[in-house]
Amino acid sequence: MPMIDWADIDTVLLDMDGTLLDLHFDSHFWREHLPARYASKLGVSVEQGKAALYPMLEALEGTMQWYCLDHWSERLDLDVAVLKQEIRHLIAVHPHVVPFLEGVRAAGKHLVLVTNAHRRSLELKLQCTGIDMHLDAIVCSHDFALPKEQPPFWAALRTHLPFDPARTLLVDDSLPVLRSAARYGLAHLIAVTRPDSRQPARVVTEFPAIRSFAEIMP
């Protein structure tokens, strides 16, 4: 059986980081680049910088603060958005994404990017990739002060962007986000198994899963 019957879909909601875009940029930034800059500011080794920063990140994972560049800029006394610019060359679109977006719009579906990314990070990535030209709308969870990991986010989204949960597809690399959407009642959910091109594919059994968008091309 095909993973998706496109006749059952009106709205397609797509995550950005790890889904449309290679998560390697974000992984490298948070695990390597930012700790190195933080260590330099503190005058300590990179390993000491990581030891100081990693627990802060892990304590807030999945919250609105985790995704907020303003929060980390204030907490670390660094302009995090500017530091992201330093490695913008790592921002990349996953293979098969653009043909998929073109195919979905050609099929008459409403195509929406729904991201937890901070607005300044979102703007940088759109500048580097131009994927916004293939979308009907872009929604940032910061506008609702709710991350996608929380089921109330989807109710807030629905007031802003009317959609029928029974006829909506969400593709996301985050299992907590997919669980949240499932609890809200979205009927069509697909996980991405290789969000970071530098890492091996994950085994996902909880949701239908794809390694690339070529597998679900309309």
Image: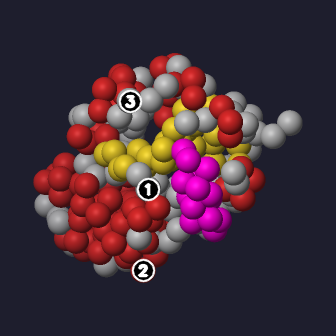
Magenta part of the chain: 95-109
Describe residue 170's horizontal placement relative to residue 213 as left or right. Answer: left
Q: Is residue 217 above or below residue 45?
A: above
- Where is mark 2, residue-wise? 89
Could you tell me residue 117's position as x and y percent?
A: 34, 51
Q: Mark number for residue 111?
A: none
Q: Residue at x 28, y 52 (%)?
A: 118
Determine the main secondary structure of the stretch shown in magenta: helix
- Where is mark 1, residue-wise? 135
- Where is mark 3, residue-wise? 162
Residue 45 magenta: no
Tell me the kind of residue under disc 1: Leu
Q: Residue at x 44, y 29 (%)?
A: 163
Instruction: Count numbered badges in the picture.
Output: 3
Mark 1 element type: loop
Tell me the kind of residue under disc 2: His
Task: Pick whichever of labels 2 and 1 is earlier in the sequence.
Answer: 2
The Cα atoms of the two marked residues, 2 and 1, are separated by 23 Å
Describe residue 108's horizontal placement relative to residue 190 as left or right. Answer: left
Mark 2 element type: helix
Task: Pick whichever of labels 3 and 2 is earlier in the sequence.
Answer: 2
